[in-house]
Amino acid sequence: MGEKTISRNKVLGIAGLGWMFDAMDVGMLSFIIAALKVDWGLTPQQMGWIGSINSIGMAVGAFVFGIWADRIGRKNIFIITLVLFSLASGLSAFATTLSIFLILRIFVGMGLGGELPVASTLVSEIVPAKDRGRIVVLLESFWAVGWLIAALISYFVIPAFGWRIALLLSALPALYAIYLRLKLPDSPAFSPKKSEKRTVLQNIKDVWSKEHARSTFVLWTVWFTVVFSYYGMFLWLPSVMVMKGFNLIQSFEYVVIMTLAQLPGYFTAAWFIERIGRKFVLVTYLLGTAASAFVFGTAESTALLIGSGILLSFFNLGAWGALYAYSPEQYPAVIRGTGTGMAASVGRIGGILGPLLVGSLVSAGYSIGFIFSIFCGSIIIGVLAVAFVGHETRQIELA
């Protein structure tokens, strides 16, 4: 039992470090977008494209690398995606035009989009059923740590040294995570012999087979609605704060405060997920996200803005943790990477549309309250799918 615990904690730590560096990059991007607007004189549509191009890469990465995780193993994909992500992120610090920056962000997104579903799949397959949901949510909690570090780097580094130095700081530590992963064993559920007997097309078809169609429908719906709203709201948070009358430094300060609320969101979700279930956490925390988004969008006082922003972070990131725990549990090992990766890929389409929608609606003169109401409605659709169609998978042994 001792060996299993050590192995489990080691996998959680190694996967979590990579997760943290990914979050640092995505979190910093929201601040960099605000800084690039000043440096390069970007329009709202161009600002929206920076967030969306990242999600295009993530959609491709989740789809391609999720499928290949079932072919060549979780560990190999784990290493490949982090190498791709860290190299492209470091190179983007040297971009001199928006076009070059966008091209590099596609590759950053591919690495990031491929890594996250594969990481949750690997951890899910190593951890016993009684702890699986809690451990995967704790894995996701590294995202909050990464966001917090991103917010602190953005607050202290970007105003003083510029966004290029901030990007370099986020990319370099990822090399350490690559070194750690080389020593990581592959998932015990992955079988090279079984994977060789199956084609990629067969795996894709099986995700929508009669046996798995219901689960796939729920996952695709909830992934799309959650990612659409998350990237639409969170990539624009610093910029929205500026639109509401705060300067860039003030907006960074308030976003740091909001980011701190992500950690208790994860930890409470991790506590509830094994005691009450995946569906309860997803439904409850998504409803909390929807309500917070509506209040944040219409808030006029500083206190209400910060309060609703804190609740938005708390509930939204708790729901993310539950979603990453819930997704790999819907499929058997032979198609688990494919199924989880495809769901994440569909979600990233929402991540493409969300930031673009904000940019276009802001340009057209629509209020932030109206825009955030759209995200509120999107989340409600995800809630209905999970509540009325989804299976509960708490304590289920993975095949």
Image (tube, helix red, strand yellow):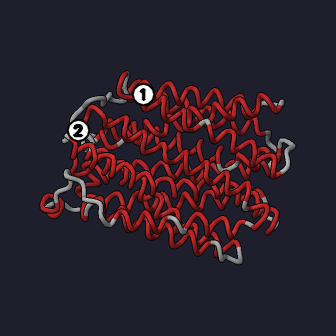
The residue sitting at 69% across, 35% down in the picture is 309
Q: Which mark is residue 211?
A: 2
- Asked whether disc 2 touches disc 1, contact meaning CB atoms under 8 Å apart, the reply is no
Rate crowding at label 2 as few (under 14), some (14 to 19) or many (20 or more) other CA atoms within 10 Å: few
Rate crowding at label 1 as few (under 14), some (14 to 19) or many (20 or more) other CA atoms within 10 Å: some
Q: Position of residue 218 (x, y in %)?
A: 39, 36
Q: Which mark is residue 250?
A: none
Q: Earlier in the sequence, mark 2 or mark 1?
A: 2
Q: Position of residue 339 (x, y in %)?
A: 32, 49
Amino acid of disc 1: Trp
Element type at marker 2? loop
Quadrant (top left/top right/bottom left/bottom right) for the N terminus: top left
Work out whether residue 288 or residue 78 is closer to the camera in this orientation and state it. 78
Decide: is 137 above or below 101: above
Decide: is 87 above or below 43: below
- Quarter of the image for residue 89 reads bottom right
Q: Is residue 334 visible?
A: yes
**Mark 1 sits on what residue?**
271
Q: Position of residue 138 (x, y in %)?
A: 43, 40
The residue sitting at 30% across, 29% down in the picture is 394
The residue sitting at 59% across, 41% down in the picture is 229
Amino acid of disc 2: Glu
Question: How many badges with numbers are in the image?
Answer: 2
Q: Position of residue 208 (x, y in %)?
A: 29, 45
* 13 relative position to 301: left or right: left
Decide: is 293 above or below 58: above
* 306 relative position to 168: left or right: right
Element type at marker 1? helix
Disc 2 to disc 1, C-alpha distance: 30 Å
The residue sitting at 61% across, 30% down in the picture is 290
Q: Nearer the viewer, mark 2 or mark 1?
A: 1
